[in-house]
Image: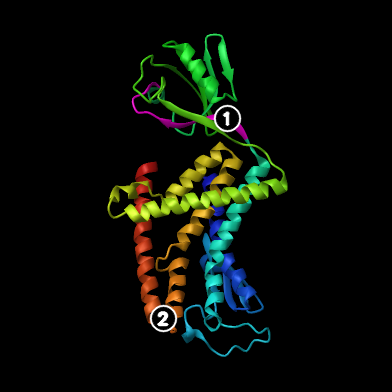
Amino acid sequence: MLEIILIIIALSVLIIAHEAGHFFSAKFFRVRVDEFGIGFPPRVFGKKIGKTLYSINALPLGGFVKIFGEHGPSEDTPLDDKEGEVSFSSISLSRRAVILLGGIIMNIIVGWMLLSAVLMIGIPFHLGVNEIVENSPAASAGISPGDFILEISRGSDILYDPISPEDFKEFIAASGENEVNIVIQRGEEEISVSLQGRVNPPEGEGSLGVSISMFGVPREGFFSALVHGARETADALGTIVKGFYHLLSNIFSSPEIAKDLSGPVGIVMIAKWAGDMGFVFFLQLMALISLNLAIFNLIPFPALDGGRVVLLLVEWITRSPVSDRVQTAINAGGLLLLLALMIFVTIQDVGRFF
């Protein structure tokens, strides 16, 4: 239970980092920020510094930032402010776009920093299981994707971790139909299984019906890790963009694709699994979640940062701001759709993991 609470806190930190991106961007352009909150009301503690209230709230599920004038000129009142802070709606469209995209930029920076930290720490190399073929010897023995192979033996012949994929395949080929013992690591647990390979397996399945590869990250120096981390961040962002494009372009023609979506419950369970694998794996997963948050918020959908940037684009084209009422209606509709999606994927997650 404690580790799940820590995981929820870690995920909340990523959301707070997103809001901090909006906060720092607004402060950079001297836009007044009325409140920066950790968690959601009811408020537990608050301290006002300058014109900004910094609050800690009872629901520790992220955070929020209230920017003066963010919801249109109707909020504008004369600012009696010696520090020269201004309203969000009074600044240029380009500066407003930067503030709206500040959260996305911050999530990308956090993802980059976490991936760089993973490279600095390094991950020991282990032989890992990628996929298992149904009704194969590996499936019957209870081996699962994500398991690490620590040892394989046949009589007095033993291979110890780290085992290369080539050595593993040669060992299995030499074993024929003889029984082999495999010690796997699943989370913090070590499990020993026995199985027999197939001499004439179906084409493409292999003797055991298991797909394997080496998992690990070599340790790098500080500057090398930052450069390599930036490349990995760019690669990950490209992969995530392709994934979102595939999802959005096929969701209506192939509704079954929605079965692969995960919500908060699924993310917590996956994070728990990554935490069981080790702290570095958990950092790596947090980095990928941060980058996913960045791309998700960039989608031009109402209530998301990308949708709000689209409204700025409409204002630029028409030379007239979108009315408060229209913005409120669009964002409310977007929030309802996002809430419905969250309920749907949460129900899926509960059925999948419990």
Left or right: 292 in relation to 325: right
Residue at image position (46%, 66%) is: 306
- Residue located beneath label 2 in the image: 322
340 over 321 or under it: above or below:
above
- Marker disc for residue 126: 1
Q: Residues within 10 Å of mark 1 (few under 14, many from 20)?
A: some
| Numbered disc 1: secondary structure | strand
Q: In 3D space, how far apart are the residues under numbered discs 1 and 2 (Cα atoms)?
A: 56 Å
Q: How are the residues colored? A: rainbow
| Magenta segment, prevailing SS (helix, strand or loop) | strand
Percent coordinates x, y for residue 188 in the rendering: 55, 33
Tell me, yes or no, if residue 217 can be seen here: yes
**Relative to 292, is 333 above or below?**
below
Residue 130 sits inside the magenta stretch: yes
- In the rendered structure, which amino acid carries the disc numbered 1? His
Residue 185 belongs to magenta span: no
Q: Which residues are magenta?
A: 124-137
For the point 34% across and 44% down, the residue is 351
